[in-house]
Image (cartoon, grey):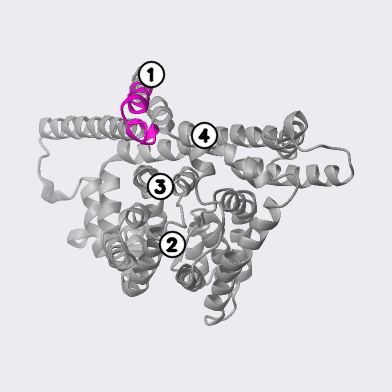
Amino acid sequence: MSTALAAARTGLDFTLAQQLTVTALCALSAYLAHRALAVFNDGVRPFLLDFHQGRATRGATTAVSFGLSAGFVFGLGAPMALSTGVLNPWLLFLPTDVLGLLAPRRWLAPVLGGAWGAVVVLGLDGANDLAHDLPVDFLTAMRQMSTPILYLFALFPVLAVTKQFGRLPGVATGLLELALTVLTMKLWPGMFAGALAMAAGVLTLIGLAVGRDLRGRRRRAGTGSEDGAPNAGTGTSAGADAGTSADAGTGAGGGVEDPMASLFSASATRLRRHLPLFMLLGAGVAVLAQSHVFGGGEATSFLIAQGDHTEAAQVDFYRAFGFLPLIATTALASGAYGIAGFTFVYPIGYLLPNPGLAALAGAAVLAAEVLALSAVGRILGRLPTVRDSSEHLRAAITDTLQLAILFGSLMAAAAMGGGLGILVVGGLWLLNEAMGRPVVRMAAAPAAVIAGGILLNVLHWLHLFTPVTG
């Protein structure tokens, strides 16, 4: 794995077409954020309804966005881009959220967003070259993070199954993933060993969740028939009521209007009115993914850097299921969508052979998502176990990545500074914990590697440290 990554792209030198794509996409995403139509940060989206309806000021909303995003930009987005040579959404789209909301005029938002995109594609390559020329090359050391991130990330379905369905299904899923990982390493050594295992784990979770929901529906149907209330036309089913009023925005049959259903209907209608903008956004994201200088996640960035585009598509496809319900419900509640939609546009872009097809597919995918948003909300309302599964998946992804990034950062610390490197990086991480996590936990370890690398270079210039070789 380390050999493969060493041979992968490590520079951030972009072609003119790639530079223009990044700049234009950042301009568009900032414009959408300014109009409260789309943001990347899921935590910011719920605040946009008050902003759009005038109950929150632009300054207050910008402060929320900055507070929720800054740690990920500088602690995760920038270190991941520098260490892999692949751009990521935290580096590109979290700043455009902030800049778009900050801009006081509509025309200024795309200018600020485009300027950020230009800074990224023009400035990071110089920073990358400078860091690699230092006596303590902490960016090369950060490639040590690839193995724990890739392999531990494959276990997130096991955690999700265990938390939702108990120990026995969790152990069974873990044994299945272990067997498939060993089998893949033996029979298909050129394939990412965790890909097949991850697929089996996610399918197991979805199968268990759908099975529980179907059994629950059969029990409820049986109870309803025994109670002598089989008449669906009465509208007594909560799912039917939600499904009817989510589109109509009024109580079916002259009933009392559901305020939440009315809100969801208004939000879906607002997003559909701006469908051309979302199609343009989908086209841009897909083209950027097709260029293979962009990865949608931590594990994906390393896979893209290694040229494993099929495995990267598989990883982001499964990851999307963990965030789909969150994005759908917050979009319906706030009237603001995700910059990458449900993120299915990432794997589609990785796999397509040219930018033209990627643009068409990306536009079609985001258009389909926006048009289907109300239907997705109704389906999720009728499958509570599946909806809960996404919560467990998202929490499991966070847990596995936190461990993987911490472990990988300590490996990087050892590679660049031996025991002293571990002391500095581990100490900075522990200090962040003791101070109440001013830097979010997932971003704290990579930020500590960069800070530790700078400190080790200073110690080297003071003749107090000799860099680790080999």
The residue beneath circle 1 is 171
Q: CA distance from mark 1 to mark 2?
A: 37 Å
Q: Position of residue 181 (x, y in %)?
A: 37, 26
Which range is magenta?
A: 178-197
Image depth: mark 2 or mark 4 in front: 4
Q: Earlier in the sequence, mark 1 or mark 4?
A: 4
Q: Is residue 466 above or below residue 266?
A: above
Q: Earlier in the sequence, mark 2 or mark 3?
A: 3
Name the mark on residue 11. Answer: none
Q: Position of residue 48 (x, y in %)?
A: 50, 64
Residue type beneath disc 3: Phe
SS for tag 4? helix
Image depth: mark 4 or mark 3 in front: 4
The residue beneath circle 3 is 323
Residue type beneath disc 1: Val
Residue type beneath disc 4: Thr
* Point 86% across, 47% down: residue: 461
Q: Earlier in the sequence, mark 3 or mark 1?
A: 1
Residue 297 in the magenta stretch? The answer is no
Residue 189 in the magenta stretch? The answer is yes
Q: Is residue 83 above or below residue 93?
A: above
The residue beneath circle 2 is 339
How many residues crowd around disc 4 within 10 Å: few (fewer than 14), some, or many (20 or more)?
Answer: many
Residue type beneath disc 2: Ile
Side of 441 relative to 14 (left or right) = right
The residue beneath circle 4 is 147
Q: CA distance from mark 2 to mark 4?
A: 29 Å
> CB of mark 3 within 8 Å of CB of mark 1?
no
